[in-house]
Amino acid sequence: KQEVTQIPAALSVPEGENLVLNCSFTDSAIYNLQWFRQDPGKGLTSLLLIQSSQREQTSGRLNASLDKSSGRSTLYIAASQPGDSATYLCAVPKAAGNKLTFGGGTRVLVKP
Amino acid sequence: EAQVTQNPRYLITVTGKKLTVTCSQNMNHEYMSWYRQDPGLGLRQIYYSMNVEVTDKGDVPEGYKVSRKEKRNFPLILESPSPNQTSLYFCASSLDSFNNSPLHFGNGTRLTVT
């Protein structure tokens, strides 16, 4: 059974500092890995999707890396801003199906 | 505007009274799914659908039903709600059935069963 873990559960940084968010998974046979952002009381917004054959994916200040062999993905957010405050979740589908398993999320607070 | 629309946003009901939460997407997506989010348990998949008339159980399907008669709609039905189904529910969709495209989420339905 796939288990997805995100540590730490919460993170507080001053504005301008780079953010490093971790996601680990137990079964390396993943189809892809997605990073999401969730604002309080809202749905999730997809940030980045990394295919299993890719090593990283970039979008603006966001960069996500994927190391399947070690079961890890890292989301980097450069030059953090107060608007980056949110909960960040990663999720992986099984290779042979479509069940998505989510991590518990990392709640980020960027202080002005 | 491309979106996933859930209704209602908030719902308070009593044990045993059947209810339906609607979900509709306007992006011609093949894949749709329902999740519930609970403190300490995270997001868990209830049911998913890879296309019209094709549905399958997720990790926590007990007490729920779904149908996919049209591509755009994927309602979640609680035949006899119980207090342990009090939760925040999300509907999501993606373009294809193989998770090669990002998931789009609705804004959620907060359900309270007393």
Image (spheres, rainbow, N blue to C red):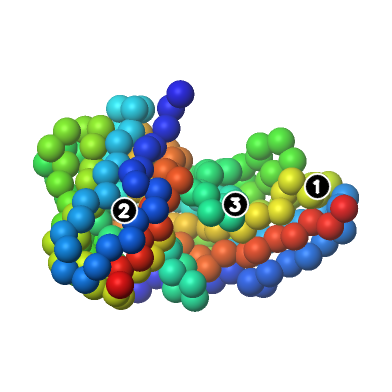
Q: Give residue B47's position: percent from left, percent from top.
A: 25, 56
Can you say whether B45 is above or below A61 in the image?
below
Within 10 Å of disc 3 (Cα), the crowding (few <14, some 14-19, many 20+) is some
Can I make out residue B77 in this image?
Answer: yes
In the rendered structure, the residue with mark 1 lies on which chain? A
In the rendered structure, the residue with mark 2 lies on which chain? B
Q: Identify residue for label 1.
A: A81
Q: Nearer the viewer, residue B53 or B12?
A: B12
Within 10 Å of disc 2 (Cα), the crowding (few <14, some 14-19, many 20+) is many
In the rendered structure, the residue with mark 3 lies on which chain? A
Q: Are marks 2 and 3 in contact (CB under 8 Å)?
A: no
Between the C-alphas of marks 1 and 2, the distance is 32 Å
Q: Secondary structure at mark 3?
A: loop
Within 10 Å of disc 1 (Cα), the crowding (few <14, some 14-19, many 20+) is some
Can you say whether A85 is above or below B69 in the image?
below
Q: Residue at x 40, y 48 (%)?
A: B9
Q: Give residue B27's position: percent from left, percent from top.
A: 35, 27
Q: Give residue B40's position: percent from left, percent from top.
A: 49, 75
Judged from this view, the residue extending furthest toward the top is: B1
Q: In the rendered structure, find residue B34 and report the number of the disc placed on it.
A: 2
Amino acid at the residue labelled 3: Asp
Could you confirm whether marks 1 and 2 are on the same chain? no
Left or right: where A49 falls relative to A106? left
Numbered disc in front, either 2 or 3: 3
Could you confirm whether marks 2 and 3 are on the same chain? no
Can you say whether B67 is above or below B65 in the image?
above
Q: Residue at x 16, y 59 (%)?
A: B18
Amino acid at the residue labelled 1: Gln
Q: Identify residue for label 3.
A: A39
Amino acid at the residue labelled 2: Trp
Between the C-alphas of marks 2 and 3, the distance is 19 Å
